[in-house]
Amino acid sequence: MTREVDAVPCLLMRGGTSKGAYFLAEDLPADPAARDELLLRVMGGPDERQIDGLGGAHPLTSKVAVVSRSADPWSDVDYLFLQVAVGAREVSGRQNCGNLLAGIGPFAVERGLVPAGEEETSVRIRMVNTGHRATATFPTPGGRVRYTGDAEISGVPGTAAPVVIEFPPSANPLLPTGNVRDEIDGVAVTCVDNGMPTVLIEAAALKVTGYESPAELEADRALADRLRTIRLVAGRLMGLGDVSHATVPKPTLLAPPREGGAVTTRTFLPVRCHPAIGVLGAAGVAAGLRIEGSVGAELAVLDAAGDRVRVEHPSGFMDIESSLGTAPDGLPRAGRTAVVRTARKIFDGTVFPAPAGTAPP
Ligand code: NQM
């Protein structure tokens, strides 16, 4: 008989513009079904308000990171990301989260998985969901994680210590359909995957400007229907199968920049509109814009001299360093990608999951 878990050590952290519950894998059930059932009770699902748990009633605050020492020779730790649905009994590991990734290095040091350096620490992370790798570097003066600092990221009040995240060049196809452009439902799209399957669509092609607020876009039912149709077809073309219950691919609307950046974006999670943009989603936009003939290449304003792409979004911008390589098949591959995020330890303690069987159906 399996014992019901009634108290779990947990660290609540902001990672970038998201917030999540971080766990050591050894503190959770090894069986994925039992783990997911427990996490629903921890986060307060499937209640829309998540009133009886840690979740914040939005996909960006209903996230979980599960961390362990890695058996991979390159990596210090393994990071499994789990999206706990809001309003549905679903826990999905079908995507990464580059925002919660910002908290993984600090968490690994806090929990003693990785020794801290005297000034700064670099942690090499394997993202279990997709096999991608990343290195996170952050200040640890005197061997302790420092969360305060001068780095400012759009979508988070104040400043904090920088977490520099670097993704090595990826061997995975950047264009999973094998095409620079596809046409779906009469609309040109570029399906790109630089760690997050993303569908690039010109906002004007769906009769919006791309400068609307997330609330305005969420209220547009006709737009939601178009995006759903496009996403389901794109999912199949990208080899993801039936994505009707998946959080990927993410449709992303593009429009010319208005604030001196390279492009303006509105991205969907895939139903709620992101108040900013995901890290790997933005990495996909940045790489996609560089591909000749892609959707977005013509409206983007790229700095020919450097690798930096400033991706505008509803609450400001995200700067991504992004380069492209070419694979033996002649198709583009993502080169090195880098971004600065911040993270903050909010609460360290014990979480008490709601008792089994109390959640509404
Ligand atoms: O794309 C939202 C977020 C994310 C994911 C989402 C992310 C990324 O903002 O790497 O960060 O697209 O689900 O946390």
Image (cartoon, helix red, strand yellow):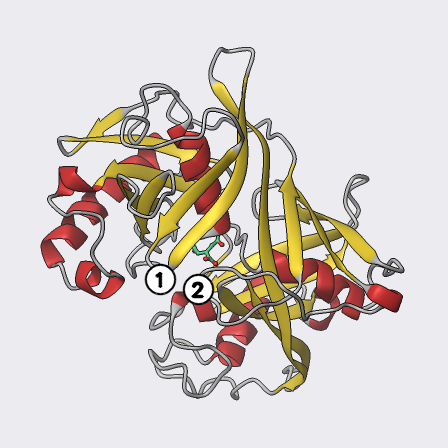
- Using the rendered view, name the quadrant where residue 4 is placed: bottom right
Residue under the point 51% across and 81% down: 54
Residue under the point 18% across and 62% down: 216
Proximity of marks 1 and 2: CB atoms separated by less than 8 Å:
yes
> Could you tell me which secondary element the residue under label 1 belongs to?
loop
Q: Quadrant of the N terminus?
A: bottom right
- Compared across the picture, whether 15 is left or right of 84 comes to right
Residue 85 visible in image:
no
Q: Look at the picture and state if 11 lies above or below 329.
A: below
Residue that label 2 marks: 155
Residue 192 percent across, percent down from the top left: 40, 33
Residue under the point 57% across and 48% down: 129
Total numbered labels placed on residues in the image: 2
Mark toward the viewer: 1 or 2:
2
What is the number of the mark on residue 275? 1
Which circle's residue, 1 or 2, is located before the other in the chain? 2
- Compared across the picture, whether 202 is left or right of 163 comes to left
Q: CA distance from mark 1 to mark 2?
A: 8 Å
- Using the rendered view, name the quadrant where residue 294 is placed: top left
| Badge 1 density bin: few <14, some 14–19, many ≥20, Cα 10 Å | some
| Badge 2 density bin: few <14, some 14–19, many ≥20, Cα 10 Å | some
Residue under the point 41% across and 87% down: 51
Q: Quadrant of the C terminus?
A: bottom left
Residue 144 percent across, percent down from the top left: 82, 69
Tell me the kind of residue under disc 2: Gly
Q: Look at the picture and state if 327 lies above or below 11.
A: above
